[in-house]
Image: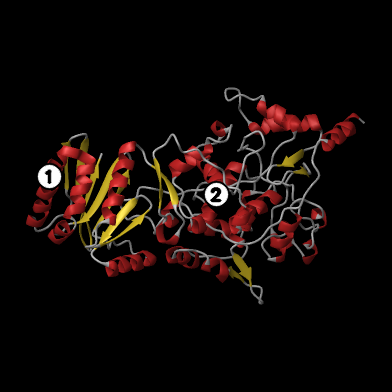
Amino acid sequence: MRKMFIILAALLLLTPPQLVHAEHDQAYVGIEELLAESDEVDGTDAEGAESYAESGETYDDARESVTDSVSVESYADSENAYAATDEALAESVETDAETGESVAETGEANDYTGDPSSETAASLPFPDIRGHWAEEIIMQYADGGIINGFPDGTFRPDQPVTTAEFIVMVINSGTRVDEQGVRDWDEAFLERIVTQSKKNILKFAGHDFSYGDPWYQNYVDMAMNISLIGRFQFEEEYTKPLTREKAASIAVNFSMVYDGFIQNEYGDIAATIFKDFRHFSSMYARFAGKAAILGLMQGGPGGEFNPQRQLTRAEALTIISRIHDKSLREPAEIDLSPYPYAIVPGANGYPDQVHIFMNEKQKEVYEIIVQAVRHEDDFFSIQEFSSFYFYEDESQYERHMESRDLLDGLLRYDLGVGPLGSGFDLVIKATEETLDRYENILDILLESILYDDYIEAKLFILENYKKIHETEYITNYYSEKEVGDYKILISYFYREIPYFSIRFE
């Protein structure tokens, strides 16, 4: 009787369920190595890309009172804290933070392997989703063949989603099943991907949408091939419930083909909006930050992300629907006033992005180059993120872009410059014509970095150019010199034609 009274009291505190509306718009993939730019700057852009995603739940007053009382020092395991609250409530009753609705979890163990081969047509419609806050989203993805139910015909929306189930849901959301029952990438999905290179990765990296042994293996292999997940990121975890912080990594990687690259430093800063940002595992905080920036995931009413809490199957679909449909997102507002930053152009048609500089000097040099490029008509230049690339003419640039789409790794630009670490990186074609053509830009760059010491730096660069051209055969070349506040490091490499890499550290 006491248990029933506690359950009824908890339910009376909760708001009535509402229905979440889901549409369709965008989604997919990526970590840095394959996706974060074959469109990335060749050798000059040190930026990377990564991953993580969100559910979207809040907690009732009883649950908040427990989490709020846990200090950073005493915090050991959020799952234990929530388990203690569950005992007090006698049932797992939550308020969904994304929708403001009550969600009563079943509390049963997730002993289902997820093997769709054992499912039948009786799994649709799902009788246990009627009136659920995610009913419309669930039916949308069931109709599209994106999700499967359980052998008993249920969907179990409040049951924790496993890592394998989420990976399969995410990948399948970019596919369609034809009239013969064959699943492949949805052409409409591929068309929305901005760059050809990323389309090529999806189409040619190897994909098998059949079920393997274990049932999810082909999807896991595919997720690794397209850098949706790290090769060793989820070892021994595929059949275990997925936490919010790890879901964030997958969701952010998936969305990158639509939303473009988000700088890691920006993600790190964004993660600090969550009161429990110190409770993230390893490097997952930055992906929760990126998920908040994109509006894929938010925190609870108390300001916590709850990184260790398990994601439910309904919440998983909510995140995926936000990847596909930007109108469903609620991007977080991040205060960047304490940091040196600029809004920079995204590469290859991607939206503009925030770039965080490591120091005020980098931002100052960046702004000087922006102004200098605007007044130059003797060559073609393009800006990607915080880096600049210079070409003899537009046709040279077009050849460069073609090579990127083919992923041949060859450089086509004459000069590239951008921030690297706390300093700067410059890559220049090692020919006399290149030096003559871009002498004015080089002078502006060197003077903005070194002030009155720029002449000494220029002479050092010219001296090394001369050595290269006087040497018949070069395998390795390296030279360094202290000039002003910087150490200048010059190295040589060959990509069809010789290039210098000049770093200011």
Where the N terminus falls, by quadrant? Answer: top right
Q: Nearer the viewer, mark 2 or mark 1?
A: 2
- Side of 316 where 102 appears, left or right: right
User: Splitting the image into 4 quarters, where does residue 384 fall?
Assistant: bottom left
What's the amino acid at mark 1?
Phe
- Side of 369 where 200 appears, left or right: right
* Residue at horizontal 68 percent and vertical 49 percent from the top: 315
- Side of 332 where 404 appears, left or right: left
Instruction: Please tell me whether residue 365 is drawn above or below residue 19 in the rendered image.
Output: above
Bin the neighbour count of mark 2 within 10 Å (Cα to Cα): few under 14, some 14-19, many 20 and up.
many
Task: Tell me the CA gap for discs 2 and 1.
Answer: 45 Å
Query: What kind of colouring is applied to the model shown?
Result: secondary structure
The image shows residue 294 at horizontal and vertical percentages of 55, 49
Instruction: Please tell me whether residue 279 is drawn above or below residue 418 in the rendered image.
Output: above
Q: Which residue corresponds to mark 1?
A: 460
The image shows residue 360 at horizontal and vertical percentages of 33, 37
* Residue at horizontal 11 percent and vertical 50 percent from the top: 462
- Side of 167 where 61 appears, left or right: right
Residue 326: numbered disc: none
Q: Which residue corresponds to mark 2?
A: 294
Res. 478 visible in picture: yes
Comparing 390 with 271, the one in front is 390
The image shows residue 457 at horizontal and vertical percentages of 15, 43
The image shows residue 459 at horizontal and vertical percentages of 10, 45
